[in-house]
Image (cartoon, rainbow, N blue to C red):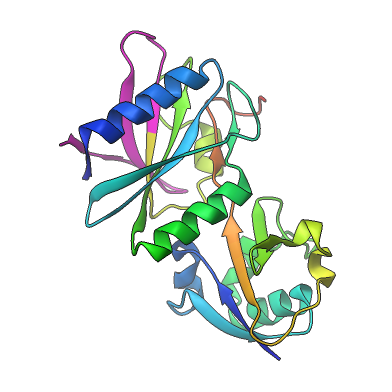
Amino acid sequence: MEVHVRIPSSLKKLAEGQNVIKAKGETVGKVVQSLVETYPDLKERLLDQQGTIRRFINIYVNGEDIRFIGGLETPLKEGDQLSIVPAIAGGALTGSS
Amino acid sequence: MIRIPRSIYQRMVEHAKRECPLECCGILGGREETVKRVFELSNIEKSSSRYVMSPQEQLRVFKELDEESMDLMAIYHSHPHTIPFPSETDVEMAFYPEVTSLIISLKERDNPVVKAFRIEKEDILPVEIEVI
């Protein structure tokens, strides 16, 4: 089954210049796996050393945050729209909150 | 170079003042170096030294920018107590190195200073602001 994955311009140079990628997979996790296999440069940006999604990467399926609908196990259907959106974050001081 | 209409520039500064002592954050959308719209977003950290934009609001703004054929031109946030220069946190969290970062310093409360940069992992490059 095929889904469409939208990535921001900051990542598209790592995916041969595409900002919408067609990918296959039955769950979000499988699609992410397929993406990093096809575009290995994306791997470091999306996954940590344990192979889990980095804390500051948000993934949405048809606008729903996957954290609230099943995480990487979220099932997908033909034509679903995934968005991979790195957080926008920062702040004045290092290591404080 | 980034061109910012005076009304949007003032709204950004007012946003920073209103949220002070907490950091504020937002997005500027536009085309061809000129800002057309400002989006104030929530800082879900509610902190005076860190910010994380609300992911839901961020996604909504990205969608709106797409619908209006506008680019994500700049990301802004405030430094309520420090100078307008990217901190180590700003560099570490620069997930959008191709986008201009604006920092509004309220170190001198009556004299807010706004500076713009491109924040890359290896480099911090100043960007000229033209208020139009």
Tell me if B102 is positioned left or right of B24 in this view.
Answer: left
Residue at 47% over, 23% down? B79
Q: Looking at the image, is B99 positioned above or below residue A46?
A: above
Q: Nearer the viewer, residue A21 or B26?
A: B26
Q: Is residue B119 magenta?
A: yes
What residue is at 27 percent from the left and 46 percent from the top? B35
Horizontal arrangement in the rendering, residue A63 relative to residue B132 (left or right): right
Question: Farthest residue in the bottom direction?
Answer: A1
Quarter of the N terminus of chain A within the rendering: bottom right
Query: What residue lies at 69% left-to-right and 82% top-to-bottom?
Result: A34
Tell me, yes or no, if residue B94 can be seen here. yes
Q: In the image, residue B98 lies at what x, y percent?
A: 38, 55
Residue extending furthest toward the left: B132
- Residue under the point 31% across and 30% down: B115
Q: Nearer the viewer, residue B54 or B119?
A: B54
Q: Could you tell me residue B29's position as x and y percent?
A: 35, 50
Residue A95, quarter of picture: top right
- Kindly tell me whether residue B124 is visible in this rendering: no
Q: Quadrant of the C terminus of chain A?
A: top right
What segment is highlighted magenta in the picture?
Answer: B103-132
The relative height of residue B117 versus residue A35 in the rendered view (above or below) is: above
Q: Quadrant for residue B113, please give it.
A: top left
Q: Position of residue B65 (x, y in %)?
A: 41, 58
